[in-house]
Amino acid sequence: MRKVLVIGIGAGDPDHVTAQAVRALNAADVFFALDKGDDRADLAALRRTICDRYVDGPYRTVTVPDPPRDLGGPSYRDDVAAWHEQRVDIYEWFVRDELADEGCGAFLVWGDPALYDSTLRILDQVAARGRVGFTVEVVPGISSVQVLAARFGIALHGVGDPVHITTGRRLAEGWPAGAGDDVVVMLDGRCSFRHLDPAGVTIYWGAYLGTPDEMLIAGPLAEVAGEIERARAEARGRKGWMFDTYLLRRTSPGGPAGGP
């Protein structure tokens, strides 16, 4: 039966690739990738760098343009579902037509496949169609959340306390209900920390973590929010894309740092 490997390759530094991931890279007959356009050419180049460093001998890659994403509809979830459905068609074609019956194919995933990545969810939908049989094996990777904490030399939570991981879209609604004093935010395209009362909140912000373009800013939210917004806008304009992750740490006593 066909085998599909979903390999976490870290946040951007080739040194983040684990020994388990190296073994998985060398087990693959073919690597599947979506072309996200010229703006993300540096990410494609970094993926090739990782393969060139760790794969013994020649390797084959099959690349297809990523379907355009339209999130302008009334329902964000419906928009994402429609976009994913197009990816399901592509992934099914990858496995069915580009992988031999007993072959092994691989998807390389930035960070960790279990954290805000759609690859596993889409492969589940391919399997549910029942048109092609395959097994899936997941290799965990170092996420941007782990790299962020390492760069600042901090733990993500207090002793015995929880840490809440959410998206910028959710944070825009306010400090997450039921969350403790530590909130990690990913997929934030609009600096959603602007919607919070900054009093007593410290932010640890990182962008392009693990890459030569890495950016780090930390401090009281009230003092560095503007600096982060300016740095983020400049970098996005220069590179054409932005991926950042940050930790918000609430240190003031009493109620939440913000919310509706």
Image (spheres, rainbow, N blue to C red):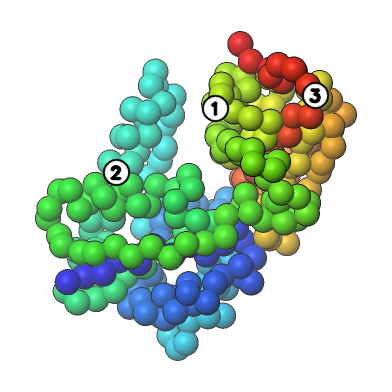
The quarter holding residue 181 reads: top right
Disc 2 or 1, which lies upstream in sequence?
2
Label 2, label 3: how many angstroms apart (C-alpha)? 46 Å
Is disc 2 placed on a helix, strand or loop?
helix
Pointer 1 with pointer 3, Cβ within 8 A: no
Q: Position of residue 74 (x, y in %)?
A: 39, 18
Determine the residue positioned at 33% across, 78% down. 29
Nearest-to-viewer mark from 2 and 1: 1
Q: Which residue is mark 1?
A: 169
Per the rendering, the mark at residue 7 is none
Residue toward you, 150 or 211: 150
Per the rendering, the mark at residue 252 is 3
Q: Residues within 10 Å of mark 3 (few under 14, many from 20)?
A: few
Q: Which residue is mark 2?
A: 86
Q: Position of residue 214 (x, y in %)?
A: 73, 54
Q: Position of residue 150 (x, y in %)?
A: 72, 56
Q: Please name the amino acid that badge 3 sits on.
A: Ser
Determine the residue positioned at 40% across, 41% down. 68
Nearest-to-viewer mark from 2 and 3: 3
Q: Position of residue 233 (x, y in %)?
A: 73, 36
Nearest-to-viewer mark from 1 and 3: 3
Q: Please name the amino acid that badge 2 sits on.
A: Gln
Rendered-image quadrant of the N terminus = bottom left
Q: Please name the amino acid that badge 1 sits on.
A: Arg
Asked if residue 230 can be seen in this view, the reply is no
Label 2, label 1: how many angstroms apart (C-alpha)? 23 Å
Q: Residues within 10 Å of mark 2 (few under 14, many from 20)?
A: some
Determine the residue positioned at 29% across, 74% down. 104
